Amino acid sequence: MSNSSNVAKAMSPQYILDRREAVPQIIGDHTDFLFVCGLAGTSKDIAALTNDADHAFTMAGVMGGAVSVGLGLALAQPHKRVLVATGDGELLMNIGCLATVAVMNPPNLSILCVDNGHYGETGYQKSHTSLGVDLMQMAVGAGIVRTRTVQDAEAIADGASVLREGNGSSFVLMRVAPTDSKSIKRNMNGDACRVRFRKNLLDVNT
């Protein structure tokens, strides 16, 4: 094998992490964050981690909206750490939101994109990231300064620090194997989730 082939192999995306283990590891103490979650997999990941708690807004049926909602929340609550947890398919639906995040640059906003290279909710068809699209590089191009790609266990600690530290918005792409999240019965009523999330936030701020 040529040197160029070795380099290409070393740089090729790896989808090996188990999301059921990696997501809790990279987040750490979930009570440190207000969560806005994308569809399906990441909503299940965060619901399982938090026991479907009131400080997590797990969205349903609003594909492409997670980062925009998280940005608004971060701007409205500058003293709270906001973590958007979303997937590659959901983020691709509204990739322009990364440019707005970079321009506004709230220091309390972090984005975790759990990239399994597939549309897990509709039959595991390959998403664009399986075909060469690099969402971290798109975040860099949008102007987000603090970015990381995590695709093995050794990189999780560094990715965790990026989500929690810094004076500007951050973006972490974590590549995981295309397997299901933990099974959990969560509240699928978007309006009810909004009401309980808002009540929790108002109670904490009182």
Image (spheres, rainbow, N blue to C red):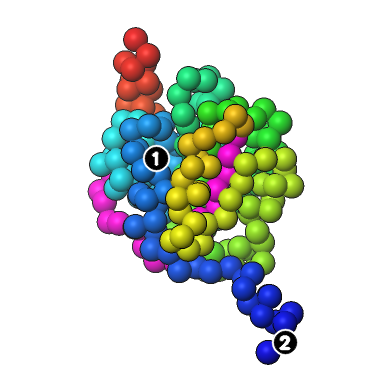
Mark 1 touching mark 2, by CB under 8 A? Answer: no
Percent position of residue 156, x then y: 45, 54
CA neighbours of label 2 inside 10 A, class few (<14), some (14 to 19), many (20+)? few
Percent position of residue 109, x then y: 54, 32
Image-quadrant location for residue 131: bottom right
Percent position of residue 166, x then y: 57, 33
Report the residue at 51% width, 62% height from top.
151
Q: Mark 2 points at which residue?
A: 2
Badge 1 marks a residue whose secondary structure is: strand
For the residues labelled 1 and 2, the Cα–Cα distance comes to: 47 Å
Report the residue at 35% width, 49% height from top.
24
- Whether residue 89 is situated above or below residue 77 in the rendered picture: below
Amino acid type for the residue under numbered disc 1:
Thr
CA neighbours of label 1 inside 10 A, class few (<14), some (14 to 19), many (20+)? many
- In screen coordinates, is 7 left or right of 14? right
Tell whether position 175 is magenta: yes
Badge 2 marks a residue whose secondary structure is: loop
Disc assigned to residue 58: 1
Image-quadrant location for residue 34: top left
Name the N-terminal-most of marks 1 and 2.
2
Percent position of residue 85, x then y: 47, 44
Q: Which of 187 and 113 is in front in this view?
A: 113
Q: Nearer the viewer, residue 106 or 131?
A: 106
Report the residue at 43% width, 61% height from top.
153
Asked whether residue 53 appears in the rendered view, the answer is yes
Disc assigned to residue 128: none
- Whether residue 52 is situated above or below residue 26 in the rendered picture: above
Region in magenta: 169-192
